[in-house]
Image (cartoon, rainbow, N blue to C red):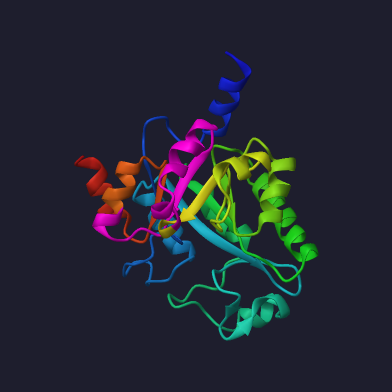
Amino acid sequence: MKPYILAMALLLMPFEMGAQHICAHRGFWKNAEAGKTQNSIASLRLAQENGFWGSEFDVHITADDVVVVNHDKTYGGLPIHSSTYAQLCTHPQKNGEQLSTIQAYLDQGAQSSCMLVLELKKQDSREKADKMLDICVEALRERGLLDPSRVMFISFDLEACKRIARELPEFTNQYLNGELSPEELNQLGINGLDYNSTVLRRHPDWVERAHRLGMSTNVWTVNSKSGMKYFIGLGVDCITTNKPLQLRALLENR
């Protein structure tokens, strides 16, 4: 196999060639069983049980260096970066769960082959962002999940993506912010893009251009039937959605 063909195959390894994949946004959470609680362990378990290709989740780091699974910078009215984990845990989640650490979340993640789509949220300093990534990588390694077929990384933090490109080049590593073309990402060694639907509607050619460079493509967050049909037609590798059952039905009935 020629070197450039091998490189392309390795970059796209988590994505079955010719298929399109469903990623449950913050887990499969819009249902009574998950208590309509995004980023909960229940939402991950339900994404696994429903057989979705992937489940996305977000991480932050506390003042005492505990990595927690939460989308916003605040939790229970408290800023995560300046609060201890014990302080945050005085507020249960909507479904009654305790705010999950990365370790507890990955214990559930190890229970199936569902792709763990790990979003590294921007932090208040480079030091904290780097420590958060270090803790995540170690937690993945301890559970046998530090494997490109089991986890991929996404982030709005360009420096985090560049670090992953240097240190974990075999992993799918997608930038989220949307201002960089596939060629610019490729120059930085970043092997994927995961852009908002409005960005890819403005630049539909970026999907094909990314694929020509051996890069993976994802789009977020697509919840309308018309949007799903558009991005299925555009040929993105993965669609991130809060309505994964609806997307599955569309893909099955093409």
Instruction: Give the x, y percent position of residue 242.
Output: 36, 61
Instruction: Give the x, y percent position of residue 8.
Output: 55, 28
Do we see residue 233 in this rendering? yes
Q: Is residue 8 left or right of residue 15?
A: right
Q: State whether residue 10 is above or below residue 42.
A: above
Residue at 57% in and 13% down: 1
Q: Is residue 127 left or right of residue 103?
A: right
Span shown in magenta: 199-227
Q: Does 238 appear in magenta?
A: no
Do we see residue 111 in this rendering? no
Q: Is residue 113 left or right of residue 134?
A: left
Residue lying at the far top of the rendered structure: 1
Instruction: Give the x, y percent position of residue 32.
Output: 31, 70
Instruction: Give the x, y percent position of residue 196.
Output: 45, 58
Residue at 75% in and 68% down: 65
Q: Is residue 165 left or right of residue 1?
A: right
Q: State whether residue 132 is above or below residue 169.
A: below
